[in-house]
Amino acid sequence: MLVTDPYQAASLLHDSLAGGDPELLRLLAVMEAALPARRREADRRASAMGLANRDRAIRAAAAMLPEPRGQAVIAAVDRYRRTGWQRDRLETELPVHLAGTVEAHLWVALRAYPRFPTSERMIRKIIR
């Protein structure tokens, strides 16, 4: 059976998972091929928005730190990742105890986009 409708493919996939149907991989391929270009474009826009939010949060954190800001941002995010981020990363909203701190901006940056720049040069480029 050839399935071209992504909604029908999703329904079949759900049924296959429940029954252990071996055609799971084929259905996944059909769903991927049937995804409209609009969906992929929406994913790209969401990723761009996340990147913009991350960069905005990095700039806000850098404004609260001493010079040289590139090194200070890297040191602050490394420190936060080793300490508070371990506890705060599962929060869906900004933890109250971070309000008004550099860590609040770092939390937003780390939540907004999956990757955080690790080079001083990239941080300086963002905060310019």
Image (cartoon, rainbow, N blue to C red):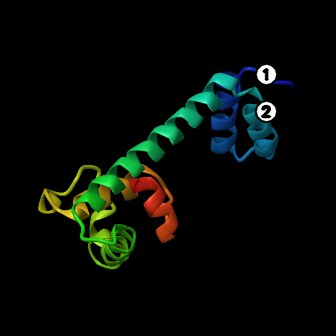
Residue 118 visible in image: no
Rendered location of residue 114, percent (x, y)? 49, 56
Residue 45 appears in which quarter of the rendering? top right
Mark 2 sits on what residue?
Answer: 30
Q: Residue at x 27, y 64 (%)?
A: 88
Which residue is identified by label 1? 4
Of residues 77 and 15, the one drawn nearer to the viewer in this rendering:
77
Q: Residues within 10 Å of mark 1 (few under 14, many from 20)?
A: some
Residue 86 is left or right of residue 5, and the answer is left
The quadrant of the rendering that contains the N terminus is: top right
**Left or right: where does residue 65 sit relative to residue 30?**
left
Task: Determine the residue positioned at 31% across, 69% down.
Answer: 85
At horizontal 35% and vertical 47% (from top left) the residue drawn is 56
* 82, above or below 67, in the image: below
Is residue 52 in sight in this rendering?
A: yes
Q: Pointers 2 and 1 in contact (CB under 8 A)?
A: yes
Q: Quadrant of residue 124?
A: bottom left
Q: SS for tag 1?
A: loop
Sequence-earlier tag: 2 or 1: 1
Amino acid type of the residue that numbered disc 2 sits on in the rendered structure: Val
Note whether 46 is above or below 69 in the view shown.
above
- SS of the residue under disc 2: helix
Marks 2 and 1, how far apart in space? 7 Å
User: Which numbered marker is on residue 49?
Assistant: none
Number of marks:
2
Q: Amino acid at mark 1?
A: Thr
Q: Nearer the viewer, residue 26 or 45?
A: 45
Residue 19's spot in the image, x, y percent? 68, 43
Residue drawn at x 66%, y 44% as measured from the top left? 17
Outermost residue toward the top in this view: 5
Direction right: furthest residue: 1
